Image (cartoon, rainbow, N blue to C red):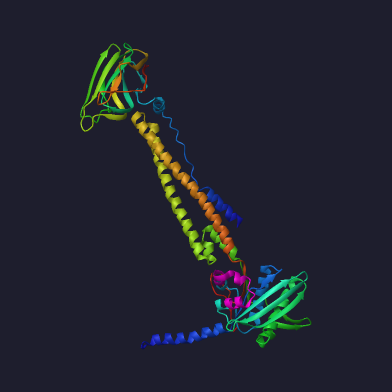
Amino acid sequence: MNRYLHTLFLVLMLLSCETPDYVLNNDVDEYIQDLEAPALFFHPVKAEVSLNDTAFVQIYGLDIDSAAGMHLQVQYDWGSVSLDTVLADDFFAASDDTLLFFNDNDGTVDIFLFFLPNEVNSISGTNALCVLVFTTLSLGESELKFGSDTKVVNPRNEKIQISEFGKGSIDVQ
Amino acid sequence: MAVNNPRQKIYISLLFLFIPLSFLYSANSVAVLHFSGDGFSSSAARVQSDRFRYVLSEIAPFNIKGTGQSLQYNIFNKESTIYEKCFDLACAVKTGQLVDAQRVVMGSITRDSVQFHLEVALVSVEMEEILRSRERNYSGELDNLEAEIDSLVLDLFADEINPAIYASRFLITDEGLVPVEIIDDDEFEIKYVNHRLRAMLLSATMPGAGQIYSERKRAGYSFIGTWGTLAILLGYNYYKYNTAKNNADNLYSKYKNTDEPEWILEYRSEVLIEEKAMHRHNNNLKVLRNMCYLVWTANMVHTWKVAPETTIILGTDVDDDKVGINISIPLN
């Protein structure tokens, strides 16, 4: 009798599940979690490319609320890398057409992005704003950072406060 | 309404034949109730009443209603305390009516320091009167009390005992009449049925089964219903837990293998949602598991309380495996 009871007790004891722990330690995620939203940052944070190769660096908006236009000023090591072009990315994909202008001036590139309204007139969330395409010119690490003129506006042309600007780099090996 | 079908006529004739036969059968029956004990354990008193019933069944030419399971259960279900402690006229009459006996034997055994006082009475259920009673005092070991019980049977039923059976079953010795040792007789069996153990094992396996075995069907079905409800809730929560876990595993794998920030953030939030659901359902499982412990324990305690004790079945053609069978011992 006792043997049966012990067996049954053990079976009942096993009727609970081991809950797995999910360690959310993706490198990119850890970097994003350290940012204070809303924020702008480069992705990848450190682009590793070869000499005379092309480096693609995306600019991301993190938890941006109701953005309708942007002026992104990016400073880079002029001489170490050169900017080939700037392409619009997915952030304003809901727009009929994303207007993008850029002006590269000796290590400082000013990028202007505008959302063309259709049913909606602004976009919120986290997504890639544009892609910077560089050509590497010399070995070493060159820094990417946002300039002081960078700003994001809503449909009423009011400035949206950005809490943090991330820094990036291009490591030429 | 005329009956023209010959087969129906045969059935009706057989029916009218069996009805008086069944009345005859019950009319010549004696129920021996468990003796009450004073200064004497209930189990020991029960053993002596079993002995009384056994001897009576051996020497008296009528049907002895005894400790058959269904009789006992029926009485348990209605008024078990009356059956256990029955030593008054009204109780004996009522019990006799319940078991459909013509007469009832009730008895008591009182023990003071050195002496046993045995008292039995034969009650007419129909007349609701004590027909006769006998008393006996006995000083000595408990082992020999059975001999006194045997003598009481003879005293109480002296006028009705079948002389032929009587002669074959008892010997005249220097100490008086002594029943022949018939325990080993091939035609008789003694079976000890531990109903409580059976009920406990059944209840341990399936809560409520022991109660149903003990004829406490309402309680049994309640326990089974509760257990079933808990099982359904356990199944539901396990299914939800498992689904959430599979989703979380899948999303976590994607989260680890992507390097696009927007997807990382989306997978991250979905992993957290699924993880939360998983924890919620796992907590539900733990609560339900604890409830299962409680219900199971309560079920076992309840089974222990309601299960009949060990029953000694005496007689021919004993089939103790059939729960609810009516054990009676016709002599002819």
Residue B222 left/right relative to B52: left
Position above or below: B28 against B78: below
Residue A33 left/right relative to B290: left
Q: At which x and y percent is residue B271? A: 40, 37
- Residue B259, image quadrant: top left
- The magenta segment is B74-95
Q: Nearer the viewer, residue B161 or B191?
A: B161
Majority secondary structure in the magenta region: helix
Position above or below: B179 against A10: below
Residue B3 left/right relative to B35: left
Q: How many numbered circles are shown?
A: 0
Give the quadrant of the C terminus of chain B.
Answer: bottom right
Q: Nearer the viewer, residue B136 or A22?
A: B136
Point 55% across, 83% down: residue: B25
Residue A97 left/right relative to B151: left
Point 54% across, 85% down: residue: B24
Give the quadrant of the N terminus of chain B.
Answer: bottom left
- Residue B328, image quadrant: bottom right
Q: At which x and y percent is residue B9? A: 40, 87
Q: At which x and y percent is residue A107? A: 30, 12
- Residue B63, image quadrant: bottom right
Q: At which x and y percent is residue A13? A: 54, 48
In this rendering, does residue B203 appear at all?
yes
In this rendering, does residue B185 appear at all?
no
Residue B221 in magenta?
no
